[in-house]
C-alpha cells in the first residue's frame, strides 16, 4: 500500500479503545533531545521483550525520520490492507514482533514527508485506529524528539485507552538532561505516568580489560539520569554504555528482504532472518543490560501483570 492509498483508506476506522483492546500494555518512548538513542532503545526493548517471550508491537510515529524499520531489519517491507484493518509488518512467521511505521508507506527509503501538524495528526489517528495488531503484550510507541504535534496527537487519541506510561531516554550531558526535564514536565502536564528513565551512551569501556574491571571512560559524563530519577522520585531503569557493536548491529542490520513475496523473512543466504537477528543481539553486550531493564519495566507497567 502506498502513502496516498494509506491516507485515503478510511474503511477500517474504529475508535482507539476498540482497536487497542487486544493490547495489554502501551508504553511511549520519549526524549527531550534528538539523537540520544530513543529508536535504538525502542528496538532493543522490543527484541528483549520478544526474547522474554512477550508478543510485541512497535509503532513508529517519528513521521519525518522513521528509523525503526531499518533497525529491526524490515526496510523495504510493505503493509497490507485486510478486512480487519491494516496488517502491520511482522518480523517473524510466529508474529512475535509486529511493526508499523510510515517508512512502510513511502516509495523508497530516501523519500521524506514534509507535513504540517494536521496531516501528521491524521496519520497518527489512522495508525491508532486502523492497524490490526492482534493480541499483544506490549505496544511500544517510538516518538520524535521533544514535545511536538506527534506527541500531542498520540496522547489525545490514547486518552480514552490510557497508556501505561512513558520511558524517558537521556544521555548524561547537561544539555540532554535539561531537555529531558522539560519532557518530564510535559508528562506531568498531560497526566502521563513516567515509568522510568534510561541513561543511554553512559560511558565507554575501551577494551576487554576495562570491561572486566567495569572501568568506563565517561565520554559524555555519567550519572545525570540516575540523579534526575532520584530528584523526581522516578524509577531509574538503567545505564546503557556506548557500544560500537550496537551501531553495527542496528544501523547495518541485514534487511529481511525488500520483496513483498519474501514471506519467510529470510534472505537467500539465511542472513537477515529474525532468528538470526535475535541470536546476534544476544551476543551484543547491551542485551544483558536490556534484559534487566525490561525486568524493571514489566514490574512497573500497570499492576505488573502481563
Ligand atoms: N548505547 C549506544 N552505543 C552505541 N551507539 C548508540 C547507542 N545508542 C544509540 N546509538 C547510535 O546513535 C545513533 C542515534 O540513535 P537513535 O537513532 O536511536 O537516536 P534517536 O534519539 O532515536 O534519534 P532521533 O532524534 O533522530 O529520533 C544511532 O546510530 C544508534 O545506533
Image (cartoon, rainbow, N blue to C red):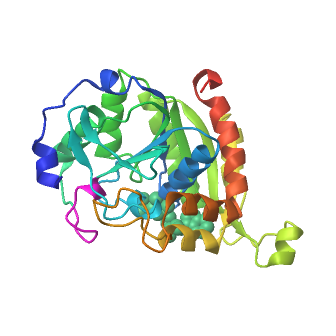
Residue furthest toward the bottom?
Answer: 207
Let me know if residue 227 appears in the view: no
Q: Which stretch appears magenta?
A: 102-112
Work out whether 30 lies above or below 38: above
Nearer to us in this view, 281 or 293: 281
Residue 251: x %, y % from top left: 48, 71
Magenta segment's dominant SS is loop
Work out whether 4 lies above or below 175: above
Work out whether 295 lies above or below 180: above
Work out whether 195 lies above or below 261: above
Q: Quadrant of the C terminus?
A: top right
Residue 189: x %, y % from top left: 44, 30
Residue 230 inside the magenta-drawn segment? no
Label total for image:
0
At 56% across and 63% down in the image, what residue appears? 276
User: Going by the image, does 5 lie left or right of 19?
Assistant: left
User: Going by the image, does 130 lie left or right of 210?
Assistant: left
Amino acid at each position: 500500500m502506498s502513502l496516498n492509498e494509506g491516507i485515503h483508506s478510511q474503511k477500517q476506522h474504529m475508535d482507539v479503545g476498540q482497536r487497542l483492546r487486544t493490547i495489554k500494555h502501551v508504553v511511549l518512548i520519549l526524549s527531550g533531545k534528538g539523537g540520544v538513542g530513543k529508536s535504538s532503545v525502542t528496538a532493543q526493548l522490543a527484541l528483549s521483550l520478544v526474547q522474554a517471550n512477550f508478543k510485541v508491537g512497535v509503532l513508529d510515529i517519528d513521521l519525518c525520520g522513521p528509523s525503526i524499520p531499518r533497525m529491526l531489519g524490515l526496510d523495504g517491507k510493505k503493509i497490507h490492507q485486510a478486512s480487519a484493518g491494516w496488517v502491520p509488518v511482522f518480523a517473524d512467521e510466529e508474529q512475535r514482533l509486529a511493526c508499523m511505521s510510515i517508512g512502510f508507506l513511502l516509495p523508497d527509503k530516501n523519500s521524506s514527508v514534509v507535513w504540517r501538524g494536521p496531516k501528521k495528526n491524521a496519520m497518527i489517528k489512522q495508525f491508532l485506529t486502523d492497524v490490526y495488531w492482534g493480541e499483544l503484550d506490549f505496544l511500544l510507541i517510538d516518538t520524535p524528539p521533544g514535545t511536538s504535534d506527534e506527541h500531542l496527537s498520540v496522547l489525545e487519541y490514547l486518552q480514552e485507552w490510557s497508556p501505561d506510561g512513558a520511558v524517558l531516554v537521556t544521555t548524561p550531558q547537561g544539555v540532554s538532561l535539561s531537555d529531558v526535564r522539560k519532557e518530564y514536565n510535559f508528562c506531568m502536564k498531560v497526566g502521563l505516568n513516567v515509568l522510568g528513565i534510561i541513561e543511554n551512551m553512559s560511558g565507554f569501556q575501551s577494551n576487554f580489560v576495562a570491561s572486566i574491571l567495569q572501568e568506563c571512560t565517561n565520554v559524555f559524563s555519567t550519572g545525570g539520569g540516575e540523579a534526575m530519577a532520584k530528584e523526581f522520585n522516578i524509577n531509574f531503569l538503567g545505564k546503557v554504555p556506548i557500544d560500537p557493536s550496537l551501531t553495527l548491529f542496528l544501523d547495518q542490520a541485514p534487511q529481511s528482504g525488500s520483496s513483498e513475496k519474501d514471506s519467510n523473512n529470510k534472505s537467500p543466504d539465511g542472513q537477515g532472518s529474525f532468528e538470526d537477528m535475535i541470536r546476534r543481539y544476544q551476543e551484543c553486550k547491551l542485551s544483558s543490560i536490556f534484559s534487566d531493564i525490561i525486568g524493571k519495566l514489566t514490574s512497573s507497567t500497570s499492576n505488573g501483570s502481563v
